């Protein structure tokens, strides 16, 4: 179990680094585009690059957000529930989250197959949309893996990895 957690943490770190790179790319593209517009020569395809990088920016750090406990949670009644019930709720929420991300990945896979079939691409640079959909699928599956692993760890050992992160 510890090897799986180590591998998952490394993949989560890699996906977060990819998301950070996408953010830097977006900032640079917008900066170049704004400066170019000031001189009457905007960056050709800047919107295409920004849009596709934003897709990566949103989904790449999703697993890290869960790993750090950053997803929205309502703990209004947590202090009134017994520990066993809170643990059962945490396990079920993690399992449901894993199913949701896996379902989103499956739906995006169907959409990517359609994008390949219709040869869909961006407007100006003709970047194939399927590549970005495949990347999104990978990030969603990583988030699903992280959530499923957290559910298993909570159920078997009671270990909540979200409490181990130093903020």
Image (cartoon, grey):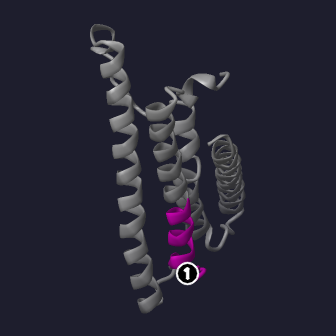
In which quadrant is the C terminus drawn? top right
Coordinates of residue 121 in the picture (x, y in percent): 51, 82
- Residue furthest to the front in view is 156
- Secondary structure under badge 1? loop
For this view, does 161 lie left or right of residue 33?
left
Judge whether 85 appears above or below 36 on screen: above
Residue 124 place in picture, x, y as percent: 56, 80
What is the x, y in percent for residue 38? 68, 57
Crowd band around label 1 with a 10 angstrom C-alpha radius: few (<14), some (14–19), many (20+): some
Magenta-drawn stretch contains 126: yes
Q: Is residue 51 above or below residue 159?
A: below
What are the residue bounds of the magenta stretch?
124-138
Can you say whether 47 is above or below 118 in the image? above
State the residue at coordinates (57%, 75%): 131
Image vertical order of residue 164 relative to residue 39, above or below: above
Q: Which residue is painted at 52% across and 27% down in the image?
A: 160
Q: Give the number of callouts.
A: 1
Would you say residue 84 sits in the magenta stretch? Answer: no
Query: What residue is drawn where x is 33% and y is 37%?
Result: 92
Q: Residue at x 39, y 84 (%)?
A: 114
Can residue 122 be seen at all in this image of the molecule?
A: no
Residue 82 seen anywhere in this rendered image of the structure: yes
The picture places residue 154, in percent across and down from the top left corner, at 47, 31
* In the displayed structure image, the side of residue 144 where residue 49 appears, left or right: right
Quarter of the image with the N terminus is top right
The prevailing secondary structure element of the residues shown in magenta is helix
Q: Nearer the viewer, residue 72 or 94?
A: 94
Residue farthest to the top? Answer: 80
Judging depth in this view, the residue of 153 and 40 nearest the camera is 153
In-image side of 67 versus 36 (left or right) = left
User: Label 1: which residue?
Assistant: 128
Give whichever of 134, 34 is nearer the camera: 134
């Amino acid at each position: 179990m510890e090897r799986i957690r180590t591998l998952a943490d490394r993949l989560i770190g890699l996906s977060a680094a990819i998301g950070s790179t996408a953010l830097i790319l977006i900032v640079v593209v917008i900066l170049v585009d704004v400066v170019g517009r000031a001189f009457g020569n905007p960056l050709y395809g800047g919107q295409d690059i920004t849009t596709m990088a934003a897709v990566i920016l949103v989904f790449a750090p999703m697993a890290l957000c869960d790993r750090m406990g950053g997803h929205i949670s309502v703990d209004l009644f947590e202090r009134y529930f017994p520990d066993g019930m809170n643990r059962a709720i945490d396990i079920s929420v993690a399992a449901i989250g894993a199913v949701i991300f896996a379902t989103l990945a499956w739906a995006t896979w169907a959409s990517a197959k359609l994008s390949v079939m219709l040869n869909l691409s961006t407007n100006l640079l003709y970047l194939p949309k399927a590549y970005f959909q495949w990347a999104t699928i990978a990030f969603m599956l990583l988030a699903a893996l992280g959530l499923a692993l957290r559910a298993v760890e909570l159920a078997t050992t009671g270990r909540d990895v979200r409490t181990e992160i130093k903020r």
